[in-house]
């Protein structure tokens, strides 16, 4: 039995002997890829390119305004303030000079505002240009 030195009243303290307790350590190192569903998946996936409907228009992003709003130069020669719709807001990052599919607002301010439906990749934009959806006089894609 030991006595505690710093207590004003003399109280006996007990010391415990835990013996040899083995605590497993975390193993450091890289996790191994065990295969799984996507182990032998092809690296390129062919997808159909979405073409604009009668109430949709193609456009190119010219300025980022913030809070999910972008300034887009549309193919009908109008500059619209467009917002990224909620379904693609966190999933798809849109930058300047990206080709996007814009749906103008139906009743109010259709010439000034719109919603961004999707972003085209560079290869999809080249396909749109080859097939005549993007006129070559507007923009040549790298």
Image: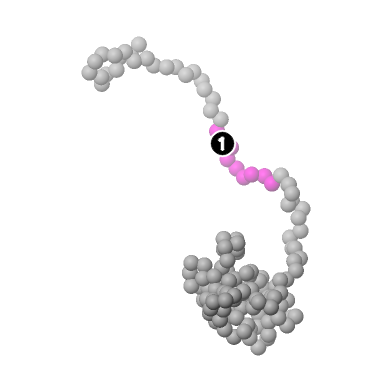
**Looking at the picture, how far across and down is residue 103, in whole percent?**
62, 74
Q: Is residue 120 above or below residue 136?
A: above
Residue at image point 64% right, 73% down: 101
Q: Is residue 77 left or right of residue 14?
A: right
Q: Is residue 104 above or below residue 92?
A: below
Q: Main secondary structure of the magenta part?
A: loop
The residue singled out by tag 1 in the image is 26
Residue at image point 39% right, 16% down: 15
Check residue 77 for magenta coloring: no
**Looking at the picture, how far across and down is residue 20, in whole percent?**
51, 20
Q: Is residue 19 left or right of residue 34?
A: left
Q: Is residue 110 above or below residue 87?
A: below
**Magenta-colored span:** 25-33
Residue at image point 51% right, 71% down: 69
Check residue 26 for magenta coloring: yes
Disc 1 element: loop
Q: Is residue 6 left or right of residue 21?
A: left
């Amino acid at each position: 039995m030991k006595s505690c030195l710093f207590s004003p009243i003399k109280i006996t303290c007990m010391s415990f002997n835990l013996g040899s307790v083995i605590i497993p350590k975390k193993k450091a190192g890289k996790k191994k890829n065990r295969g799984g569903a996507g182990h032998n998946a092809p690296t390129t996936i062919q997808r159909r390119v979405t073409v604009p409907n009668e109430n949709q228009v193609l456009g190119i992003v010219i300025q980022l305004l913030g809070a999910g709003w972008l300034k887009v130069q549309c193919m009908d020669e109008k500059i619209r303030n467009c917002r990224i719709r909620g379904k693609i807001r966190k999933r798809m990052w849109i930058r300047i000079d990206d080709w996007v599919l814009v749906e103008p607002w139906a009743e109010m301010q259709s010439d000034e505002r719109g919603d961004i439906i999707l972003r085209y990749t560079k290869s999809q934009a080249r396909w749109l240009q080859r097939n005549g959806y993007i006129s070559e006089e507007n923009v040549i894609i790298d």
